[in-house]
Amino acid sequence: MSASEEKTKEVSEETAGKGADKSKEPSNAGIIFIFFVLGLGVSIMVGWILFPKVLYSQKEQPFDFNHENHMLMVDNGCQSCHFFREDGTFSGAPKLEQCIDCHYDIHGGSEDEIIFHEQYVANNLEVPWLIYYKQPNCVFFSHAAHVINAEMDCRTCHGDIGESTSLPVYEYNRLSSYSRNIWGQNIAGLKRNTWDRMKMSDCSDCHQRNNVNQNSVQTLKGPCFVCHK
Amino acid sequence: MKLSRRCFLSFSLGTTVGITLSPLPWKITDDLSIWTQNWPWTPVPRDGAYSLENSACTLCPGGCGISVRKVDHRAVKIDGMKDHPVNDGGICILGASGLQYLYGPFRLPSPLKRVGERGEGRWKNISWKQALTEVSEKLSEIRSNGEPEKVAVISGKKEGTIACLLERFLTVYGSPNFMTPSTVEDSYEAALHLMQGSRASVGFDFENADFVLSFGSGILEGWGSPVKIFQAIGKLKKDGSVIQVEPRLSNTAAKSDRWVPINPGTEAAMIMGVAHVIIREKLYDENFINTSTSGFQKYQSLVMEDYSPEKVSVITGIASSQIVAIAREFAKASKPIAICGRGEGRIAGNVHETMAVLALNALKGNFNREGGLWSVPKPDYIKWAEAKPDQTALEGLEKGRIDGAGSKEYPFMTSLLDRFPKMINEENSYGIQALLVSNANPLYTMPDTEAVKKAFEKIPYIVSFSSFMDETAQFSDILLPNPIYLERYEDVPTAAMYKKPVLNLTKPVVKPLHNTINTGDIIIKIAKSFGGSIADAFKWRDYETCLKETLGAQWEILKKQVVTEDKNFVANSPALETNAGKFQFVADDVNKSQNSKAGIPHFEDLGINGAAGNFVLIPYDSMPLSTGYVASAPFMLKVVSDKALYHQDTVVQINPETALILGLKEGSYANLETSVGSARVKVTLYDGIMPNVIAMPSGLGHTAYDDYMGNGKGVNINQVLGVVEDPVTGLNAAWGIRAKFSKA
Ligand code: SF4
């Protein structure tokens, strides 16, 4: 073999070596891609599944309550218990005083009824109900304006709670301390029904859609002041 | 498989994209922004049913009705009660701050017994049973030693069932020493007694008047019933006018139609000067003078002799032409009213000055008629069976009052609290063994704080019924806290300087927050524990029963509507109850041994105490600073001007000229010294005060309550003010004090 031949061989071996390296390249990129997908997957799982679980904590209501059952027994629908006071303000969750109007005695023997009587009626303590749709303090909201003046149905904002046989789990946001019903069950903030969410944008959407009160009634100032007095 | 740096970067990239595609960053941003607005420690008021409950305010003698806004059972706001005859929906800053007295941490939580030294602030919680037993035993011990006169009561209230119960208790126990703080109302009462023969309060119908000539009265600074006066003067000023004669440009002076600066303490001379011009020019109501008055000649000759505008001008510093002009304006008005009582009228003043004001009003015959000055009879709804003191009590009562009221010297006076410390300190009196203090804070409100404290140190046993840890409570031996006015029933008769008799009822708009008992109940319980004639005088089961029985048919009405007013009440000539049934320009019920003019209105230079010092210190009052039993609430202190209180320092007003001479600048510190005490103060330069006069705000410098209630903020003006006794009434007539003043 001449010297030149040897050189050629060396070169070709070198080339061959390089060629062999190149053939490994796609598999490396694959690994890198796999890592990308892995990162993507993990974070999507964290963001969509784990995050809501960490963000929201569940609280137990003092005892269970059957709305459907009560609806059957009262004459005036929701307003039998969630009524407007004489001055037009809304009473919200009923006070002990209203409950014992009917439940002056133990009615039936359900476990919840017994808890109610033993822990609250007997000690004259208000039941510390957790309020699903409680708006924050900075929000001025008038039930009378919506239910009486605009004749809106309770369902529009509160859904089918009146037909439920059991209270839903109350979840509260560990950061903002709001009830989950304000943001809505869907962590992406998407909604199908009007009652799915109660953020500021939901209020303003509805006001805009129906072209009502775009300014504060009291001060005639801009839209912010409709709810933030 | 080899993990390279690229794998790691790729993983990170994937994570970032994934997180971005998840709701996490957007939701967390939203929640974080909400979180920053909802700190868990920010107090959030609970929601509930709203209601309004009407009641009455007792924080000053104004006699206003209030509407308490409640959310469920919590009181959350106090407004003025609409259609109340006194304040018709209006409220002052003190009344509006009422809730801070309800919820304040300076409230007394339960009965307390002193365990440390007096004033040290060490207390022990005791039960009500123990507290009442201890007080009863102490009182019974003093009585069984045959010294019942050595028990005294200081009551912030003169009228109403609580005051009457306390007084009744003292009577059957055997002590004449029921004392009440005096104000200009006492001076008016004395003057009315001397000139009209009536035992009545004075009332002014400002709403229907058309001219008010005020000699230093702080119409906008808390004089009389503040809300009523604000409203009435507001109405009057639409067509009529107000002239303010005062040494200092006060708020009232600034808002009046004319401010007439005057040498401090010479107001009476000005009043007489105005009378002089009216008489000289025959501008008075001849018909009234001829038919309804007596002694005019004597008064007239004194006025004509001593008070020509020229003479008055020398005394007061007011140009004689101005005196003439003011007199003509006063006389020209159809319903003019002249008033006196400096500032909010905390200091009773010289009775001859008050008489001079009554005489000036009489010249226009503007008495007991619309737009004039009314005599308002004392409330007479308390008609209890007469108490029958036993022998021990009678002996005690015979010893006479320690303060000299009702004595030969001050025959028609019923209380002279300002003389009390002096009598104890001078040790020529029989001394006091036990003092009960109700609705009052004498250790803060009485002039010459040091002397008052010295006197209190000599009293071995002090009981306070205060609801708060005030200065007097702090210096007491046992505390029996009363629920505050929002938690109790109590009758509140009369509104200061209001023209008609009114009767208010406070009611428990909230349940008592602390372990308190109404003072009325305590007195009844203690009286019962004595048995015999003392218990016999207190047959009621409890205070509420007593109140109910006393008010009779009015009880239900008052419970419903808070106030009753005799709408048809007209103070008419029967209010002139002198022997001749006339207004007397010259009073006869006066000891004239020292002064031949005593009994005739005149200007009297009583000489304010402290010969030393080139300066004259005068106090001034303002709405945000409460000078009475309750200290200013935090809401009020927030609006005190930094020209009155700068951080922890009292700021006094001086004329720039005075400042120049003393080398003082705005904000400099100065030392103020009077014969009574001294203080380090800051100065502010003010053109609205004449040279050599120093004006100092009252209502500062508490040493009790807490930091938010002005503890340690400024100087209590009573530390440097003294007492000058009025020769006729014995009331405090010190409108100011001489002072040394120099750069600190
Ligand atoms: S003026 Fe007196 S009585 Fe009236 S609201 Fe004010 S503090 Fe109360």
Image (tube, rainbow, N blue to C red):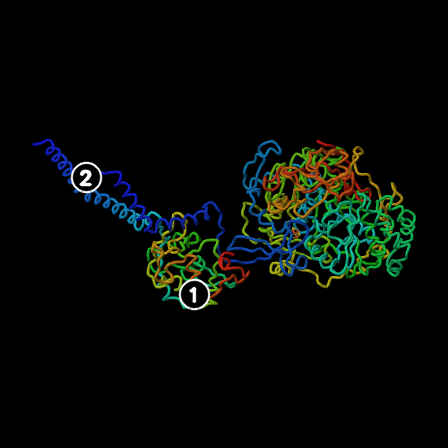
Using the rendered view, name the quadrant where residue B54 is placed: bottom right
Question: What x and y, as percent, mark residue B47?
Answer: 48, 55
Q: Judge whether residue A69 can be spotted in this image.
A: no
Using the rendered view, name the quadrant where residue B717 is placed: top right
Q: Which mark is residue B226?
A: none
Question: What x and y, as percent, mark residue A34?
Answer: 23, 45
Total count of labels: 2
Amino acid at dot 2: Met
Q: Judge whether residue B268 can be spotted in this image.
A: yes
In the displayed structure, would residue B741 be above or below residue B546? above
Observer-nearest of B297 and B695 = B695
**What residue is disc 2 on?**
B1
Question: What x and y, as percent, mark residue B434?
Answer: 66, 37
Q: CA distance from mark 2 to mark 1?
A: 58 Å
Q: Which mark is residue A209?
A: 1
Q: Chain of mark 2?
A: B
